[in-house]
């Protein structure tokens, strides 16, 4: 009998399923490190190559600005003959200082005005509840589908009737009424702000304007910076508006894009020029520097605003 029981115990132990293969519980799974070992260098190399692709035009422009007239278009990234006095002569040949001042003033006025006005309208759409709010918001967004060429002639006739053609006003005054894209962008940011903050402020007796300036604006710095940088860049590079409203004046009143176009025409051999394109290259490089500085200083807020805008719709 004892022999039979011993035999049954041995048989039952042999029928117990084997434990699944793998690491013990609680121990992290060891993965193959070969893929991770090579992935990072490959990604780094790809990023460097893509960065070089994007930096090549700027490097070419920098090299061309130091070249003499006959070597500007030789495609060398290291000038055969250095001519640093191009940066001195360009201010004698062209009113580059006036162009930079005009572009800077217009871009600041345009960026600040559209950022503030769009913020106010966006706060109204995000906070207030009133009949027809969604319809009005859709109507505002529908204006983005209207081509700019449709309103080009009417806008010019309005500014001409007001006697403001040839001044800075047409280049920034339209921004006082906001922009549909920036209104949408900032409304999305405001929708993510806790509504309890505004309700508590109303209980404390704060007016709507006080809520906007004391609560909304400090919390929406990232979105405000995005709008400011976008519009500053758009205004800084706006050749069409300057060509329409400032082209009839003297070159000293031109903006930077219009001034560079004027310099290209002035030095073109077909128009009687001597082909002194090295001055155009220097002017183009000087025009690029302010945007690089703005993006460098606004990078932190810019990235934060892009990451947070659109969390809530």
Image (spheres, helix red, strand yellow):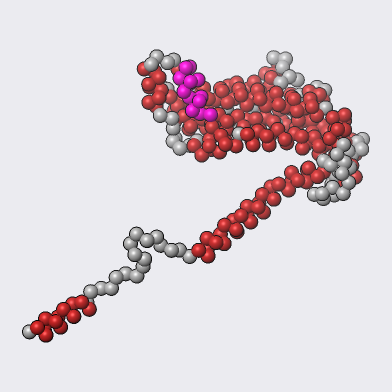
Between 259 and 3, the one nearer to me in the picture? 3
Can residue 88 be seen?
Answer: yes
Residue 161: percent from left, percent from top: 70, 15
The residue lying at 69 percent from left, 24 percent from top is 106
Can residue 139 be seen?
Answer: no
Quarter containing the C terminus: top left
Res. 108 image quadrant: top right
Task: Please tell me whether the stretch drawn in magenta is mainly helix, strand or loop.
Answer: helix
Residue 160: percent from left, percent from top: 72, 18
Asked whether, in this view, residue 118 is left or right of residue 107, the answer is: left
Residue 277: percent from left, percent from top: 85, 39
82 is higher (above) or lower (below) than 222: below
The residue lying at 25 percent from left, 73 percent from top is 17
The residue lying at 16 percent from left, 78 percent from top is 9
Q: Does the magenta portion include 197?
A: no
Q: Does the magenta portion include 218?
A: yes
Asked whether, in this view, residue 283 is left or right of residue 70, the answer is: left
Magenta residues (range): 209-221
């Amino acid at each position: 009998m004892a022999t039979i029981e011993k035999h049954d115990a041995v048989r039952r132990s042999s029928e117990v399923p084997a434990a699944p293969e793998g690491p013990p519980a609680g121990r992290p799974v060891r993965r193959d490190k070969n893929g991770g070992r090579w992935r990072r260098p490959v990604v780094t190399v790809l990023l460097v190559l893509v960065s070089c692709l994007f930096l090549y035009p700027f490097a070419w422009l920098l090299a061309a600005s130091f070249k003499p007239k006959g070597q500007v278009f030789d495609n060398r990234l290291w000038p055969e003959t250095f001519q640093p006095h191009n940066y001195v002569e360009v201010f004698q040949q062209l009113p580059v200082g006036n162009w930079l001042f005009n572009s800077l003033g217009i871009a600041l006025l345009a960026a600040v005005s559209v950022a503030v006005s769009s913020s106010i309208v966006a706060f109204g759409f995000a906070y207030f509840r009133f009949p027809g709010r969604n319809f009005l918001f859709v109507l505002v967004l529908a204006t983005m589908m209207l081509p700019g060429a449709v309103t080009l002639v009417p806008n010019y006739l309005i500014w001409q009737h007001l006697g403001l053609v040839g001044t800075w006003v047409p280049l920034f005054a339209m921004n006082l009424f906001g922009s549909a894209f920036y209104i949408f962008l900032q409304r999305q940011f405001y929708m993510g702000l806790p509504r309890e903050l505004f309700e508590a402020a109303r209980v404390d007796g704060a007016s709507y304007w006080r809520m906007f300036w004391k609560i909304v604006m400090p919390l929406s710095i990232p979105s405000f910076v995005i709008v400011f940088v976008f519009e500053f860049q758009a205004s800084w590079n706006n050749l069409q508006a300057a060509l329409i409203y400032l082209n009839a004046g003297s070159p000293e009143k031109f903006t930077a894009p219009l001034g560079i176009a004027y310099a290209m025409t002035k030095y073109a051999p077909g128009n009687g020029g001597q082909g002194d394109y090295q001055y155009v290259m220097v002017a183009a490089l000087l025009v690029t520097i302010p945007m690089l500085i703005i993006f460098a200083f606004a990078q932190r807020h810019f990235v934060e605003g892009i990451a947070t805008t659109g969390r809530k719709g």
